[in-house]
Each structure stands twice: as C-alpha cells, then as structure tokens.
Amino acid sequence: MKKILLVILTLMSFLKFSTPSCEAENLRVNYDLIYKDTPVLNFMYENGIDPEQDNDYNRCIISPYTLIRITDTLINKKVLLKPGYYLVKPENRDGYEILIFKQNGRVAGVIPVYQKVLINPFLVYKQPVKPKEPLYKKIFIETPKKIITLPFKKWYESKKVPLPPKSALESKVVGNGKYLEIWLYVDQYLYKVLFKIENENRL
C-alpha cells in the first residue's frame, strides 16, 4: 500500500512540475501563421487623403493621432513603409479593424489589426499627479468659483475643445528577428499589428 501511495505522489509531483512547461509551450505565438493569415486590404483614398482627417483635427485642440518613428523598412503584404515618422490612426472600415499610417498628410499604408484587446486605461496610461491645494484656497477660492460659474457650466462645456484620446505605443522585434510587432493603445483598446522586417542580407 505504501508503494502505491509513493507511486501516486511521484506522478502527481511530475504532473505539477511539467504543467508550467506545457503552458509556456501553448503561450508561444506563431508569428509566421499570423502574418500568413493577415488579409490584403485594397482600400482606396483619393489623392491619399483620409476623408475623416479634417473632422478629426477639428474635434481636438492638438493632433489626435499617435506619432511613431520607424527605423527599418517594414512590409505588410502589399504595403511597404520606409524609415521615417508616421502618424497612426485606428479605424473600423467595412468590418475590418485597421491602422492607418500617414506621412506628410497622406495615407502611406493601411494595415489590418490582427488582435484588438479591451484594456484598463488606468493600468496603461500614467495619471498626472495633482498638486495638493491648501485648505484656505479650497474654501475661499475654489468653492466660490464653482458657485459663480455653475449657471454657465453647460455653455462653458459646449465651447470647450476636447483633448485627443489617450494613447501609447510599444514595438518589439519578434519571430527570431523576422517581424516587428506594434502595439497601439488608444483609450480603452489595444491594437496589434505585425510587419515583416526587410533584411537586405536576406535578399
């Protein structure tokens, strides 16, 4: 009986220690397959102009797009992006989640998003530290100010120009150096796209 218990305990410990390695194996991402499954999009922009661009800028006090610097020549199927600075904008068009890369006011490429994830903005974006105000300021300045401006609150808010959406950007080389993965955070969403890095030594 003791031998049977010993065998069972040995098997349980083996399964316990082998499980993480199996989970790690499952967590490996097949970037070759992701790139292969990326659809080829043929969205047309007349003269390379995004028709929503003017509305986007009119709604915000500063540029509503995220700026990215690309240091390598990147390829996504038929789209080629050369090194330089680009403005990036997420959009849903004809059922596709896409990132629009713009340069000098023109659309340089439309890249399909291979994964869109809902995030917690408070865990991604740094919250500004509010300075502590002395008590006398709250009582004698802030409180009277709120009372005086209360009747004009709706008018003031209607005239207020909104700030652009919160955004952040990360990029990393993956797939044994073959690909560049870009993560674009905008408000409560994360957009993931994948590029193949053009390597002159491989050509």
Image: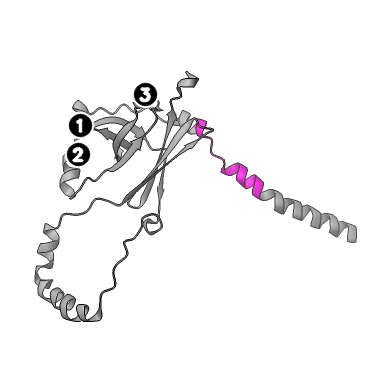
What residue sits 47% from the left and 32% below the top? 179
| Disc marking residue 49 | 1
* The image quarter in which residue 63 lies: top left
Start and end of the magenta stretch?
Answer: 20-33
Seen in the picture, residue 151 relative to 22 is either above or below; the reply is: below
Q: Is residue 31 magenta?
A: yes
The kind of residue on which mark 2 rests is Gln
* The image quarter in which residue 85 lies: top left
Q: Which residue is mark 2?
A: 53
Numbered-mark total: 3
Residue 96 seen: no
What residue sits 25% from the left and 78% below the top? 134
Residue 167 place in picture, x, y as percent: 32, 49
Q: Are marks 2 and 1 in contact (CB under 8 Å)?
A: yes
Q: Secondary structure at mark 3?
A: loop
Q: Which residue is mark 3?
A: 78
Residue density around tag 3, few if under 14, some if 14–19, many if 20 or more, within 10 Å: few
Q: Secondary structure at mark 2?
A: helix
Residue 165 place in picture, x, y as percent: 27, 51
What residue sits 67% from the left and 49% below the top? 19
- Considering the whole magenta stretch, tell me its main secondary structure: helix
Q: Earlier in the sequence, mark 3 or mark 1?
A: 1
Residue at mark 2 to residue at mark 1: CA–CA distance: 8 Å
Q: Residue furthest top?
A: 203
Residue 115 seen: yes
Residue at mark 3 to residue at mark 2: CA–CA distance: 24 Å
Q: Secondary structure at mark 1?
A: loop
Residue at mark 3 to residue at mark 1: CA–CA distance: 19 Å
The kind of residue on which mark 3 rests is Lys
Q: Earlier in the sequence, mark 3 or mark 2?
A: 2
Residue density around tag 1, few if under 14, some if 14–19, many if 20 or more, within 10 Å: some
Residue 101 appears left or right of 150: right
